[in-house]
Amino acid sequence: MTDDDLPSFRMLDCTLSGVFANLALDEALLIDADQTDAPPLLRTWELPELAVVMGASCRIAEAVQVERCRADGVAIARRSSGGGTVLIGTGALNFTVILPIDSAPGRMAVDDVQRWVLGRIAERLRAYGAPVEVLGSGDLAIEGRKCSGSAQRRVKRRFLVHASILYDLPADRIARYLGAPPKRQPAYRAGRPHDAFVTNLPMPRSAILQAIREAWIGPGDALEPPPVPDALLADLLTTKYTDPAWIERF
């Protein structure tokens, strides 16, 4: 399957209450799509408060300034996908792409899939005048500074790539709530601290959202929004995402 052969997408612009429910919804949509052979999906959302989100294997003591988060009321969460730890909230637009595994050209390796997904979005952002490029294993960068990171999760027949694009997130908050830069880091980071490495994409939110949509959905191509798998969402939220055993497992 080539880029031109992508099937029509469903579009879901949906932000639930709290970071845990939004992470659980991403996984619920992935599992539901895999079980029901549902069409591809593009979801967008943006949390109205700050939250720290770790990758599935991140070590909380290394990745998060736990005491500062607790003192400031910043939630600490863990997603089911890989990747590093990020700060999200107002000024960080999140998107999720769920596709059949055979939609990626040649069923690419994990890093290649992330670069392919982010590359489609980078192409549309450049059309709006932002000199964005894909660096590392799936970052969007502008002038060598990261404005978006991505992560991936695969199940039997579907894969999910999700990311957040920073456009108005206070840079000083990142260093306050995240731990030291990870030991494993992309070469282009060159050892830079958070405030010298991460930046906001200088584009209006509306233009970023439009670029994300245009990367996957042509004019008139969007299908009806999917129903939210409420039972699965509730189960994941209770048994996983709000469970300290999951959040603090490493």
Image (tube, grey):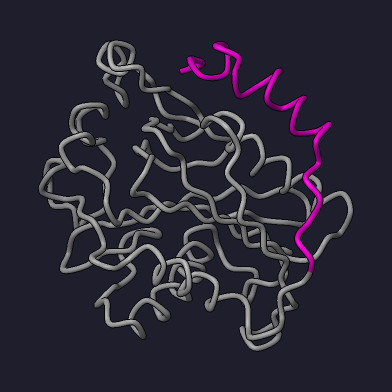
Q: Does the magenta stretch include residue 226?
A: yes
Residue depicted at 32% across the width and 26% down the height: 63
In this rendered view, identify the residue nearer to me: 200 or 146: 200
When asked about the image quadrant of residue 128, the answer is bottom left
When asked about the image quadrant of residue 76, the answer is top left
Residue depicted at 37% across the width and 53% down the height: 149
Q: What stretch is highlighted in magenta?
A: 224-250
Q: Identify whether 122 is placed above or below 169.
A: below
Q: Is residue 69 magenta?
A: no
Q: The N terminus is located in which quarter?
A: bottom right
Looking at the picture, how far across and down is residue 88, in whole percent? 38, 40
Looking at the picture, how far across and down is residue 75, in whole percent? 42, 22
Q: Identify whether 83 is placed above or below 69.
A: below
- Asked if residue 175 lies left or right of residue 227, the reply is left
Residue depicted at 23% across the width and 56% down the height: 200
- Asked if residue 99 lies left or right of residue 44, the reply is right
Looking at the picture, how far across and down is residue 166, in whole percent? 32, 53
Residue depicted at 65% across the width and 22% down the height: 240
